[in-house]
Image (tube, helix red, strand yellow):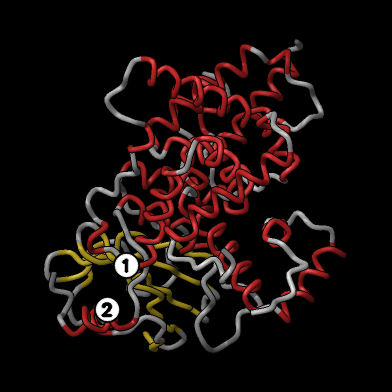
Amino acid sequence: MTDQRSDTFRRNLVALVPKLRRFALSLTGNMPDADDLVQAACEKALRNIAQFVPGTRMDSWMYRIVQTLWLDDRRKLKRRGASVDPDDVHLSDHGKAANLPEDRMMLAQTRAAMLDLPQGQREVLALVAIEGLSYREAAETLEVPVGTVMSRLSRARDALLPKLGLSQGKRQ
Amino acid sequence: MMRETTVDKALLAAFADGELSPEEAAAVVMHLADHPEDQAFVDDLMAANAALIRAFDAPMTAPVPPAILAAIDGPPVRAKVVALPKRRGLAWAAVALAASVGLAVVLFPAARPTGLTAGPVAQGQALHDALQSLPSGTTVPLTAGQDLTILATLPTTAGHCREVEVINRADRRLDVALACTAGDGWRVDVVLSEPLPEATPDQGFVPAGGIETEALTLWLDRLGAGMALDAATEAAMIARGWAR
């Protein structure tokens, strides 16, 4: 590993942080946990920098690290018999929701609905709908077949759309 | 009811997600024209995608937390990196800094006074009258060559803030300010100025550009601002004299 390559990697990693935080936020549902996750992912990436193949997509590689660390955390929580189910930790709005206009309510509902999704569906929806990855890129990131991405997306949307007050056309 | 179903949900989802080739997408567009129920489904998918992006968008405009920067690398340049739009790097960095330490900020100080300066707004000032009673989207002349428009009203944890735009044609300058209720009156929290774009029409307000949608977001987030009030709610607040 040359210093120059390491510097380039670090610079690119800094540039990716906002997207990694957004992805982590959509998984964890709260910013402190998301930031812990991103920090741990950056540390892990730097420890394993030799495994990154230059010329391949660094964002997908980093999403993968964030996602695997998140899964590890969830497993640890379950083993410890945590009293708080991560799925129940919703974004706090400091009690403002009651007086907030419709639009912000919609965003709060969207966050809550996302956190109600099973882990696999949440990951796929985050990567495709929020991070803008193609189905193939999401499949490669998560190391699952493209068909799995599509079926998880479909089930995620079946659950999500009604909670957002969207009718799903009349196709059910 | 009989319905042609040569297009399934997965294909419509792929269309909404931008997965299709131009030819495939064109075929779906043709199909949607004759199948309103499928069009409604696609609309819903796109609305959900848009809601998801907005729901988790906060980190995209927030500074990178120091702990993460430190984890990536301590001392060199990176300590100053903030995730702000590049095209206005310097100005926005100044705003971010001011926002982080709670200072009001004025960029490119006015060559001639507009009343848009940080601090309390005196009663009797044209700006005070506008803040107190002007509906959003309405433009009034402030002085010769200066037009004031209230862009929007936003609820905050402490009251309300109004986004104010002043076009100064003589100086070819555009000011955008955030004025918030303070006690019985108003206080200008932040003023941003930039040269008036060459293409700006001589009359009318300048469509919301970068200033208020990007830089002021930092302030609005700090103030716990909600989304803009609708016209009826705003009218009710004006009628009540902004009493809480």
Q: Is residue A155 visible?
A: yes
| In the rendered image, the vertical position of residue B102 relative to residue A107, given as above or below | above
| In the rendered image, the vertical position of residue B109 relative to residue A67, given as above or below | below
Percent across and percent down for residue A8 are 71, 25
Badge 1, how many Cα within 10 Å: few under 14, some, many 20+?
A: some
Hey, what amino acid is under mark 2? Thr
Residue furthest to the right in view is: B23
Secondary structure under the numbered disc 2 in the rendered image: helix
Instruction: Write down the residue under mark 1.
Output: A101
Query: Residue at horizontal 79%, vertical 76%?
Result: B30
Percent across and percent down for residue B217 are 42, 56
Indicate which disc residue A166 carries: none
Badge 2, how many Cα within 10 Å: few under 14, some, many 20+?
A: few
Query: Residue at horizontal 77%, vertical 69%?
Result: B28
Location of the N terminus of chain B by quadrant is bottom right
Indicate which disc residue B233 carries: 2
Location of the C terminus of chain B by quadrant is bottom left
Secondary structure under the numbered disc 1 in the rendered image: loop
Q: Do labels 1 and 2 share a chain?
A: no
